[in-house]
Amino acid sequence: MVKEIRLYIEGGGDTRYGKERLRAGFSRFFSALIERGRSSNIRWVFVMCGPRDAAFKSFKQALKDHPSAFNILLVDSEGPVKMRPWAHLASRDPWTRPRNASEDSCHLMVQTVEAWLMADLVTLQQYYGRNFAVGRLPRATDVEAIPKTALGPALVSATKTTQKGEYHKIHHCSDLLGKVDPALVRARAPHCERLFTVLEGLLA
């Protein structure tokens, strides 16, 4: 059994504050798995890397610096995905899969992390409260089908007259990741389900 799981995640901006906020959000989102792992003395490390290129660079370095850990790269797909994650990134960015990186070490938030939030509209309604215009959000059983170009503007439009103000990626996404139901996200975002399945396999 692996004794350390390290996730190198796109996001958090260029400030320490932004990265800490988003790291806390992801930690809460995966909290059930983290607790399961800790009961078996598995150490978890969430590294918010800012830009996607920095995430890939940090992941590659981690393969050298932490060879006994299971290192994971988690980035936005930035568009629809029609092939395996490494192949998608090779086609889009283009990034070459490191020789010592497995297929299970690469994961995507399709098409951006905001899609995960769209899987639990009840929580979004509770979070933003009065004047949250849920009708302005795109509806899709598979939230990964919502175009990236529609996600951000729709969230801004739906939230701009709420007490919390319009959607803010650092402040609001960090909070919401800790509140949305992971089971709903898994059910409506196939690549999120894939990530959970890999992580659960590491804990088995």
Image: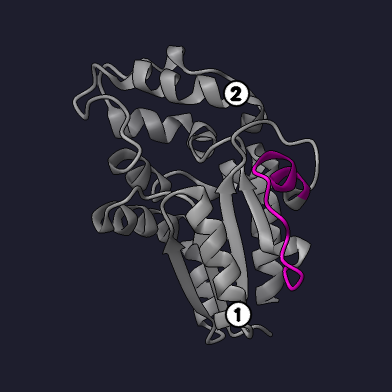
Which one is nearer the viewer's eye here, 91 or 203? 91
- For marks 2 and 1 on the same chain, the one whose residue lies earlier in the sequence: 1
Q: Residue at x 54, y 34 (%)?
A: 115
CA separation in Å, label 2 and label 1: 35 Å
Whether tag 2 and tag 1 are in contact, CB under 8 A, the answer is no
Give the quadrant of the C terminus.
bottom right
Local crowd size for mark 2, using a 10 Å CA cut-off: few (<14), some (14–19), many (≥20):
some
Magenta region, main secondary structure: loop
Is 93 displayed left or right of 158 in the figure? Answer: right
Q: Amino acid at mark 2?
A: Pro
Q: Looking at this view, name the residue that lies furthest to the left.
A: 163
In front of the other: 171 or 64: 64
Q: State left or right for residue 57 relative to residue 189.
A: left
Q: Position of residue 175 (x, y in %)?
A: 33, 46
Q: In terms of depth relative to the viewer, which is nearer, 136 or 154?
A: 154
| Left or right placement of residue 131 versus residue 6 in this view | left
Which residue is denoted by mark 2 in the rendering?
Answer: 147
Kind of residue indicated by mark 1 = Lys
Badge 1 element? helix
Q: Quadrant of the N terminus?
A: bottom right
Per the rendered image, the range of residues in magenta is: 87-101
Eyeballing the image, is 44 above or below 56? below
Where does residue 192 sit, x and y in percent of width and height?
Answer: 63, 48
Q: Position of residue 168 (x, y in %)?
A: 31, 34
How are the colours assigned in the image?
A: one colour
Residue to which mark 1 is pinned: 64
| Mark 1 surroundings: few (<14), some (14-19) or many (≥20) residues within 10 A | few
Mark in front: 2 vs 1? 1
